[in-house]
Image (tube, rainbow, N blue to C red):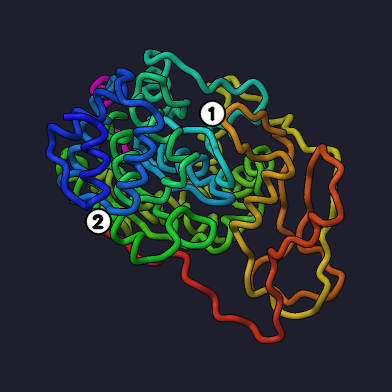
Amino acid sequence: MNIIELINKKRLGLIFSDKEIKYIIDNYMNGNIKDYQMSSLLMAIAIKGMTDNEIFSLTKYMLNSGEKLDLKEIGEVVDKHSTGGVGDKTTLIIAPIVASCGVKVAKMSGRGLGHTGGTIDKLESIPNFKVKLTKEEFFKEVNDIGLAIVSQTDNLVPADKKIYALRDVTGTVESTALIASSIMSKKIASGAKKLVIDVKVGTGALIKNIEEATKLAKLMNKIGEKNNIKVICILTNMNTPLGSNIGNALEIKEVIDILHNKKENNLKELCIELSSHMVSLGLEISYEEAKDKVIENINNDKAYNKFLEFVKYQNGDINNLKESKNKYEIKSPKEGYLNEINALELGKLSMELGAGRENLEDSLDYGAGIILNKTLGDYIKRGEVLMTLYTEKNLKASIMNTPIFTINKEKKEKEPLIYKIIK
């Protein structure tokens, strides 16, 4: 076997054997296959695709490239993953809700890159919050309070980290085969046997249409089944951002508002949906019973108090969240109904303000971001404030002309938040 032959084989749309995929991962990890060769192979995979068996093998050998967490010491946990979106702070809302219902959540999360934010960045916007714990500290916290969220260890699926870094700079992020193997290798390595995946679909997501999202969801279900993991995939709308706050500390403020029952929006609706499926899986009760528990624990502040307990346990100070000093109000140039909010453009704008990073080594302005002052379906008068921008930068006038809002005389029918559920 040699890598040139394998690149050509996939370029012609032929199928790799299990041994060939093992050869690729092993030799990429030991340096025999170079980055430029792996980039070429990833592009061939992105164009030609992979069979289910090829994806099963790819997931297996990525998984075997590093350590795996054994969660026996803490008992049964339910995990959750999102394929990433603008304003998606669901993990920070869902985890305390689910833990308050008596289901353990032991979660490893990542940083953001590009226009989608990372859970760990959001947690680090809380002063003194500790995102790195030893395995013993991680397990102790889950046993003590039913919940812990930490940054991924370097030894967990290192092949995925190395391959993802290449995908991000070679235009191969959106391959269904590569997304499925990346997500599921990490989740299997994380040790949970029950998993809810929020598959984002739309302009602000990696997956732009329901057909591709359905294909991805079914694929992840199959990988789960093969590895004795119960997977529920929920396809959700990412044409418009989740909630009203985008940016790290600003999103923590919205997390508090949702858990404190001070806000009603698409973010809260989605968090109730995802939490209910997790509680249903964890307690082995019906979705309806689980939903009743979830809503009750939001209403009685048990979920909010669990969030405060979690932040305190990991040394965070929730009372001193940063807000960037420069504030710009973007006003509507016309009157009519707010029919569209472009999630992708908002994500790009938040990066320009300093809330996101183009490269992993970029530093963040934790207080930067956007607050949407209006929501879909609102009637807007000319001159009303559509959004407020927070940044340490002095903005050019041209940044105000980003095509984010669509305002028309006729009111557009509202799109569904949940497209479908695949079990």
Q: Residues within 10 Å of mark 2 (few under 14, many from 20)?
A: some
Asked if the stretch drawn in magenta spans residue 76, the answer is yes
Q: Position of residue 264 (x, y in %)?
A: 60, 60
| 400 w.r.t. 124: above or below | below
Query: Start and end of the magenta stretch?
Result: 69-78
Residue at screen point 24% across, 23% down: 26
Q: Residue furthest bottom?
A: 410
Q: Is residue 196 above or below residue 365?
A: below
Which numbered dot is residue 309? 1
Along the line of sight, the residue nearer the viewer: 182 or 30: 30
Residue 250 drawn at (x, y percent): 69, 43
Q: Nearer the viewer, residue 262 or 69?
A: 69
**N-term mark: 2 or 1:** 2
The reply, left or right, for residue 327 in relation to residue 94 is right
Seen in the picture, residue 415 relative to 304 is either above or below; the reply is below
**Taking 263 as reference, is 73 left or right?**
left
Q: Look at 29% across and 35% down and name the residue there.
A: 185
Q: Is residue 338 left or right of residue 399?
A: left
Is residue 330 or residue 261 the one in the foreground?
Answer: 330
SS at mark 2 in the image: helix
Residue 315 at least partly seen: yes
Residue depicted at 82% across the width and 63% down the height: 385
Q: Residue at coordinates 47% horizontally, 65% vertically from top-left? A: 417
* Residue holding disc 2: 218
Which of the 4 image quadrants contains residue 192? top left
Q: Secondary structure at mark 1?
A: helix
Q: Percent from the top left, x then y, of residue 130?
A: 56, 20
